[in-house]
Amino acid sequence: LVQGQWYEVSDASVQSWGIGSATFGNDRAILSQSDGFVHSFQVGRSTRGWSLMAGDVQPQFSTLGTSLPLRGVLAQVAGPSSVFSATAGTLAHTWQGLFGETIRPTYLRDVAALKLEYWADPRTSVFAAAQRFQDRNSGNLDPQRIAQPLVRGSGFSAGARYADTLGSGLQRELAGEWARSRSRAEGQPWQYGQARVLDGSLQWPSAGLRGGWHRIDPDYASPSSQAVAGLHELYVGADWRPFAALGLSADLRTLRSTVAAAVADRVETAQRRSDATTLLANLSLARWLPGLSADASHYRVDTVTPSVGGTLAGQAVQRYDRINLNQSIGGWSAAVGALRYGARDRYFIDTESSTEGWDARLGRFFAHSGGAGHGWFNASIARQHQSRDGVAQHRTRQAQAWAGAQLADRWSANLALGETRLTHEGTGLSTRLRQLSLDARMALASNAGVTGFMRIEQSDSESTPLRYRSTQGGLQLVLRY
C-alpha cells in the first residue's frame, strides 16, 4: 500500500496539492485482476480567482445537469459576481477499468460540461449549463452482462436560487431548475426529454417546513446520478421542537416511476407508484437523569406495480421501526435499542418476512490529567431473528469490541475483535465468522513514523467441512517534508 499527500501554500491565496493511494501485489484474494490498484489520485492548484484539479474530480454543476464523479479535469474561474466552471473526463468505476486493465461492468462514458453562475445580489443567483456525453466500448466488457447499446447525447439546463434570512430569524429558500436533453441509442432514432425540479423551505428557530416537486421525462438523459429518468416525485416535510427537550420530524413522499416491457414490435409503459412515510422523534430525559435521551423512528413504503405487457401486477409493503435509549455521563456512554423490520410482497405469491432484534453498547473514554495521552474502549452485542411466512428461518448473534490508546503523540494503537454466528432454525447448524484487526503507530521523528497492521479473518460452518482463514500483515513508513 502506497499513499501520500502533498500541500504547499505559497501565500494566503495560492495553494497547490497532490494526493494519491495505490495497492500493489500478487495476492489474488486482494487484487483479483491486476498487480496494482489505484484507489485515488488528484493534483490541483488554486488562487484567489481560479482553481484547476485533475484526477478524481466530482463536479456538482446542478441536479439535472452534470453531477457525478469523473476521472478527468475540473476548472473554475471566479469573477466579482460570477463563476465559470468547466469539466471533462470519463465515468469509469476504477482507474484500471479506464485503461482496460480490468473487466468493466459497463461502457466508459466520456463527459464534457460547462456552467456559468451569476449572483444578482447576495440572495439571488441564476445559472445556465450545457453538457455532452458519449459511451464508448474499448473492450474488456464483462461477458456475463447483457451489453446495452451505446448511447450519446447532449443537454441544456437553467436554474435559479433565492435565499434570505429575516430579522425574526426566519430563513427562506427557493430553488428551481429546468432542463432539456436529446439522446440516441445506437441504431435508434433521437429521443427528446425534459425535466423540472422545484424545492423550497422555511426555517424558524424552533420549526421548519420543506417541500418539492420533481418531474423527469422517461426519455430525459444527462450525466447526473440524481436525474432518474421517468421519475415523478412530490414531497412535504416538517420539523418541530415544541420545547428544548423534544424534537419531532415528518417526511411524506409519493413517487411515480416508469415501468416498461417489450410487447411484439412495441414497448408498453406504465407508472409504478410508491408512497413513503418517515417519522422521527428524539427526547432528552436529562431532567430526571443527566445524559439520558431516547429516540424513535418509523419508516414505511407502499409500492403498487401495474401489469405491463402481460406481466403480473403486484403490491409490496416495507416497514422499519426502531427505538433507542442512550446514556452519556462523565467518560461513560451506553445505549440499548430494539428494531423490527417487516416486508410483504403480493406478486406471484403472497409472502411475508420479518426481522426482530435488539442491541446494546457500552463505552468508556480515558484521558490523562496532564494531557499525556488518552484511551477508549467500546463493546457491543446484538441479536436478530428472521422469519418468513411465520416460520423461523435464521438467528444471528454478534459481539464486537474496540479499544485504542495514544501516548504523548508518539505511540498509538487500535484493536478490534468481532464474532458473528448465524444459526439455521430448522437444522440447528450454524456458521461462525471471527475477525481481528490491529493497528499500531510509532513516531520516529517530528516528520516520520512507522505503522504496522494485522488482519485475521476466520470462517467455519457446521453444515460443511470447509474452513476459511485469511491473515494479512504489513508495515508502512510515513514521511512528511
Image (cartoon, helix red, strand yellow):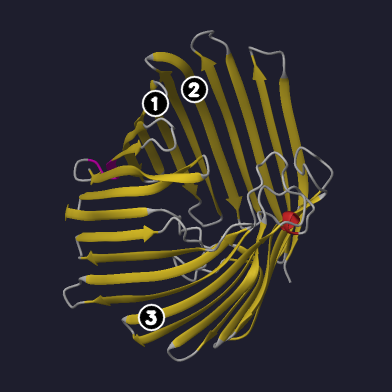
Q: CA distance from mark 1 to mark 3?
A: 50 Å
Q: Earlier in the sequence, mark 1 or mark 3?
A: 3
**Disc number lying in front (2 or 3):** 3
Q: Which residue is mark 3?
A: 126
- Whether the magenta-drawn stretch holds residue 175 is answered as no
Residue at image x 22%, y 66%? 202
Q: Is residue 365 above or below residue 480?
A: above
Q: Residues within 10 Å of mark 2 (few under 14, many from 20)?
A: some
Q: Earlier in the sequence, mark 2 or mark 3?
A: 3
**Label 1 element class:** strand
Residue 396, numbered label = 2
Residue at image x 59%, y 33%? 417
Report the magenta residues as a range.
289-296
Could you tell whether 281 is left or right of 150 in the image? left
Q: Amino acid at mark 1?
A: Gly
Q: Amino acid at mark 2?
A: Thr
